[in-house]
Amino acid sequence: MKRMLCGWIVGLTMVAGAATAPAQAPGGEEIMRRSHLAMYYPGEDMRARITMRLVSRDGGERVREMTMTRRTVKAGGEQRYFIFFHRPPDVRDLAFLVWKYPGRDDDRWLYVPALKLVRRIAASDKHTSFVGSDFSYEDVSGREPEDDAHKLLRDDTVVGRDAWVVESVPRESGSADFSRKLSWIDKATGLPLKEEYYDRRGDQVRVFTAEELKEVQGFWTVTRRVMKNVQSGHRSEAVLADVRYNQKLSPDLFSERALRAPPVELTR
Amino acid sequence: MRAAAAWAAVRRSTVEWSADHPWIVIALTLLLTLAFGSQLPRIKTDTDPKNMLPVTSPVRQYNDQVEGWFGLHPDVLVVGVWSPDGIFTSETLARVNRLAEAVLRLPGVIARDVVALPTVNDVTVVGGTLQARPILDGVPRDAGEAERLRRQVLGNALLVNRLVSSDGTTTALYVPIEKSANGKLIAAEIRRIAEKEAGPERYYIAGDPVARDTFGAEMFRQMALFSPLAGMLMCGVLFLMFRSWWLVAANMLVAMLAIVWAMGLFIGLGIPVHIMASMSPVFLMAISTDTVHIFNEFTFRRREVGDRRQAILQTMDAVGTPVLFSDLTTIAGFASLAIGPIIPVRVFGLLVAFGTLVVLLMSFTLVPALLALTRQGRSAAAPRELEPASRWLGRVGGICVGWKTTVALVGVALVAVSAVGIAKIRINNNLIAWFKPGSEIRVADAHLGRALGGTATLYLVADGRRPDTVTEPAFLRALEGLQRRIEKEPVVGKTVSVADVVKRVHRVLNDDDPTREIIPDSREAVGQALLLFSMGARPRDLANLVDNPYQKANVMVQLRSWDAVDTEALLAVVRRHLAERPIPGAVLKPAGIAYFNMVWNDEVLIGMLEGFIASCVLVLFLLILFFLPWLDRSPDMPISVLSTLSLGMAIDFAIHFVSRFQQRYRETRDLEDALIWTAARPGLGIVRNAVLFASGFAVMLAAALTPYITVGAFMIAIMLLSALATVVYLPAVIALFPGRLTRGL
């Protein structure tokens, strides 16, 4: 009940934010806080079938298919993720569990089916690649807005959608793999439409684009997202299919036991 | 015959006009020189071995593909940090950390792909928890932590001899740089950063881009310093021969004009200067000494003919044709280099050919104009008719004619012996060896070769031909077998492949059990190990070794030697190994800078040397057999055909010898006398010319870069040997087969 309430509050703030926008634009901090909720916290839980394509500069492809589930313990705060791999065949049944805490390192576990082993994974580095893609762990589970200072720069449009352009600079320079980030936040949904990451020398490194937005059960969702490393030419594309919110996922799913024996509906 | 008449008419009218309008000729020359000269400041150098082959060459295209598949960079600096107490102390590691930080910020450095202790993630297991973090993640606080790090690093097969030497005294940073960046400047930046650190450490900076760009800078020095020096030396020799400063100055003027015009044209066209082209000024100076014949003849005629204009015209009548022919053969010889596949050789050939064309043009325009203006000529000391050297040459000629059969046979035998020698030539191309021992870059390279795996990179790319081949255990085991085999070769310092990654992760997953550092038996275990690695490491760490579809694997081989012959020998070992133990379903192809150097080596140097040797050996004999009967008729087809076999310069001697011999024979009708006279009189000119040529190239012996020394020595040898062959073998051969040369005279 409490969680549902959270969802409502998020939804209401978004609507309120959008409604008041013409009169008085919210500040950068406010926009990013809302965007964080819109992107990573819609619904009390969520599941989706993700097809991730890793494409190198010369077009060589690697495809991974997984089911991701997410359960929010506290809106804007603690969350749990369960990721089950379907394809390619050699990594089938591999499963990954993340308990995300605000303000401290995540807990992560991995089940390696070939060795029938569960291994805990230290999560000191959130900038490392998510399963070899151009997305980092942070891109998947969200970087806490409080870690950066945000400034609203201007208004802009991205593919016909009105957006705020916000500049984010890490409060602690070592805490991020970027020195500066520009985000184009959709005024209507609060979702990031585009993000540009800059390295310490000020050169652009990665560009995120939301290529497809869909409304699912009243929640706007980025169902096709691309992260491109403009320096290496490598890019990763994640397509979310079969997105469902508020499935009343059991907390037991996000346990070490479920890693070894996940419920059948996730592994199909 | 018609061609000859037409040529004579054109020549005469050109010379007459030039002699009548000297100031116009000089003004026009000056104008054109300014136009070409204004291009000189735009000079660019190119020392990248890749640009030796055209963009369309298969080796180059494949190399680019390999770099694309595995996200590799063609230009990588290697920075070594050595500490007498070993690098695993808090102080040294702090310095390594600071150095890496600073290097990552340097413009031109591809920061995301810098490989160093602070930027490479290691996957370890501590108390059952897998950890992926930079190897040097913050500086160890005390000796205990440093010792733990030392054990961790030295226990990781992926790192030993690549990032850290097995004795723990040296660590390396691999710094890829942008294609547009200058390796020498970045190396200097890094050196400056390192100098700020006071400590017992020593820093070594090596790698192909440093060598190349240092070499490029050295090339400018070479051109700026050695070309004028060569010019001065040749001036000195010219003066000793002719005792006329005026003649020396005019001769050098022609040389300078040829250099400025040719270099100006090529630089203006945007063509970069390669090592070969940087030697062209010395070649052009040597070639322009051809005008000596004109000045020489003029001093005689001026004395015989009172009228200066008449003397000029007669001079050009006498020497015009030999000058034309010798310049044309030179032009054809150098231009024929443009047929070959090697870009710098093409540029060099065309540059010298164009410069020679300028010399030819000057010979019939500027030189007559200068002669028309000068009051000199009388004061130039006449060469004494029979100097001791000349008498001696005459005696040699006499002996050669007397013993013609023996001399000819000895000549044939020598050619046969040289042919055997040529077959045994092992050409070796080594960019680092282009620097002298003791130079900073060689010291750095030697240290990194000794302590670590070396700085030359070879890629062995195994293509499984369909996706996911790489995850097959049999494929990985074959790859591993190949690595173990080539690691036995002393030249191989380190090999890394996806097999090493799989083994490492497998061990870590099994609680760091060293006995589990093996390739697992199932394809699933391999795939899962790779996925796990890609979750912990930086994407490039895996991408460098396996392509996205897991179809191709890259064995990165570090070589301790830049010698092309070592690469060649190693590839032979690889081939033999694969013949016995093939990688299932895969084909293996080499790439990388070490392979490139090898291919380049084969194509460039062997091709060039063949050209040089063919020119000095074949020309002298073929010339006599085919070329000379045509000499007085039309200079078309045979010249260019023959010239493809030669570099044209050695032919000059033969042309002068034979044409002067024919003149003498026409007068005396005595074969033996004509031969001995030719050996004594024009023979002296030929020897002088050769000494002059050689003195110009002798300056290159003092160069700081060995290719200049080699080419210098080679050219000196060619000049002196071909002169010797002209005065010794030509008389003998002509005496043996007089018919062809005297027929129709």
Image (cartoon, rainbow, N blue to C red):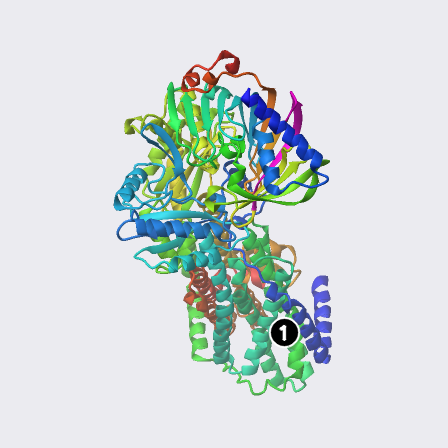
Residue found at x 40% / y 58%: B410
Q: Is residue B94 magenta?
A: no
Residue of label 1: B318
The amino acid type, in three-letter code, at marker 1 is Ala
Q: Chain of mark 1?
A: B
Q: Position of residue B725 (x, y in %)?
A: 46, 63
* Frontmost residue, B675 versus B302: B302
Secondary structure at numbered mark 1: helix
Q: Residue at x 63, y 69 (%)?
A: B37
Residue A222 place in picture, x, y as percent: 62, 28
In the rendered view of the protein, which quadrant contains the N terminus of chain B?
Answer: bottom right
Q: Mark yes or no: residue B168 visible.
A: yes
Q: Would you say residue B683 is visible in this rendering?
A: no
Image quadrant for the C terminus of chain B? bottom right
Residue numbers of the magenta segment = A204-220
Q: Position of residue A18 (x, y in %)?
A: 69, 34
The image quadrant of residue A258 is top left
What x and y, as percent, mark residue B555? Answer: 42, 36
Q: Please determine whether, in this image, residue B625 is positioned above or below residue B694.
A: above
- Residue A208 shown in magenta: yes
